[in-house]
Image (cartoon, rainbow, N blue to C red):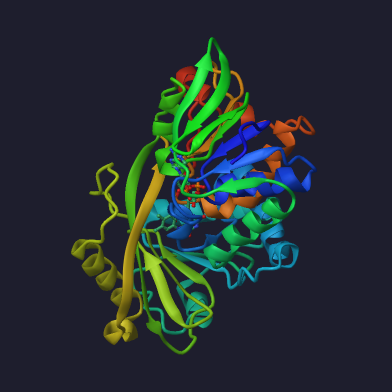
Amino acid sequence: MRDRADLVIVGGGVIGLSLAYHLARLGFSDVVVLEQGYLCFGASGRNGGGVRQQWSTEENVLLMKDAVRRYRRLSQECGYNIWFRQGGYLFLARDDASAATLEQNTKLQNRLGVPTRLISPAEARRIVPVLNLEGVRVCAYNPTDGVLFPFPVVWGMARIASDLGVEINTFTRVTNIDVRGRQIVKVVTDRGAIATRRVVNAAGAWSPQVARLAGVELPNKPYRHEILVSEPVKPFLDPLVSDLSNGTYFSQTMRGEICGGLSDPAEPSSMESGSSLRFLSRMSRSLMRLVPQLGSLKVLRQWAGYYDETPDGQPILGRVDAVDGFIQLNGFGGHGFMMAPAIGQLAAEWILRKAEHPIFSTCDLGRFARGEQRRETFSIG
Ligand SMILES: Cc1cc2nc3c(=O)[nH]c(=O)nc-3n(C[C@H](O)[C@H](O)[C@H](O)COP(=O)(O)OP(=O)(O)OC[C@H]3O[C@@H](n4cnc5c(N)ncnc54)[C@H](O)[C@@H]3O)c2cc1C
């Protein structure tokens, strides 16, 4: 392992590796990535791979338009097939408030060039004929949203970054960040120390622990989020379907498996990552209500990962007041995978001072102290 670097990235998940990949492609590879486990150890190896542009703020719609554009060409760029399939996202609203949100979001997305359509349940049934839409008021459908396979995204970005000179150290845990005055001096790991003046905290659900090593407190909290995958069945589902009434989402993989999860408002913040019978039974009931024919489907596997949640559901990006050169890229909740290519590019340009972007001042840690929280009304998986 190198003993000095211009920049050290803590976390070998999609956010840390996307930054490393984009920095290296811009010609900056004096970078070391430190990952306590294997690549994909954290949320990046446990997620549903959903990628949508249906958001409720202009910033997030534009960010996700850019991310989709980047994901469309990533397979070619990194020589790994990431299986990005644009089958669309279909949102179902059952009450007035959700219907109004979909209507408002659709107008915003259309204005920004995203071809979302507000459609009736009858039209939705033409897209997915097996759906039981009893009780659904209205749906929003964007055919250019999609689903990808997370592992090759992470592996592909890691391979290109490493080919371009970035050093990626797996099974290397950061145990201290040595700060003198306001200045970072070195990062200490269980395999030795690296002298550096710049550190990026891309440690996902572990970010508050990593920040504390440098004396910085983050408001992020980890929450378990469970998901399952079924045996493969004949293809019948193009879009990812998401029921806004309880946060159920499910899609069908290229191999025919049904993969999905749902929110659990009773889930406390913790670093618990076991699987529960409660999730299995809630998810099965919700799925059977939406597609009764799935009643005899066998579940092959269920697992869990963490959502790294901030108080306003938006990530923490950019500098902190107390420590120079300590950059945050964390707090992505259930959306870090879809945002990663756009965030990686923006952060790389910003770090190299090639371009400013307002996201690093509006989404910084200081916003909580300033009382400028950024509520996204459409925070669903
Ligand atoms: C079940 C589930 C479904 C999801 N579905 C979606 C979805 O459909 N679409 C979407 O966009 N997002 C989804 N997400 C969210 C998405 O997976 C995350 O937002 C994203 O992967 C976060 O990436 P990250 O790099 O910030 O964190 P992680 O992937 O968790 O990476 C952080 C890494 O930091 C490492 N680390 C921590 N502490 C240290 C240390 N001290 N030293 C060294 N390394 C350290 C960890 O081991 C970890 O590998 C889902 C998440 C879950 C759990």
* In the rendered image, the vertical position of residue 79 relative to residue 64, given as above or below: below
Q: Point out residue 315 in the picture as x, y percentages from the top left corner.
A: 51, 38
Above or below, 156 against 27 in this view is below
Q: Which residue of the protein is positioned furthest toward the left in this rendering? A: 277
Residue 108 visible? The answer is no
Left or right: where does residue 329 sit relative to residue 210? Answer: right
Q: Residue furthest bottom?
A: 234
Give residue 344's quadrant in the image: top right
Image quarter for residue 196?
Answer: top right
| Direction top: furthest residue | 181
Closest to the observer, 251 or 88: 251
Figure check: 296 above or below 67: below
Give the total of numbered labels: 0
- Give x and y (percent) for residue 123: 52, 77
Residue toward you, 127 or 195: 195
Which quarter of the picture shows residue 210? top left
Residue at image position (20%, 62%) is 278
Which residue is found at the position 54% from the left and 54% from the top? 337
Residue at (62, 70) in percent of width and height: 86
Q: Quadrant of the N terminus?
A: top right
Residue 120 shows in this picture: yes
Viewport quadrant of the C terminus: bottom left
Locate residue 180 relative to residue 299 in the image: left or right: right
Image location of residue 31, percent across then percent down: 66, 39
The structure residue drawn at horizontal position 43% and vertical position 52%, both measured from the top left corner, is: 42
Asked if 208 appears above or below 150 in the picture, the reply is: above
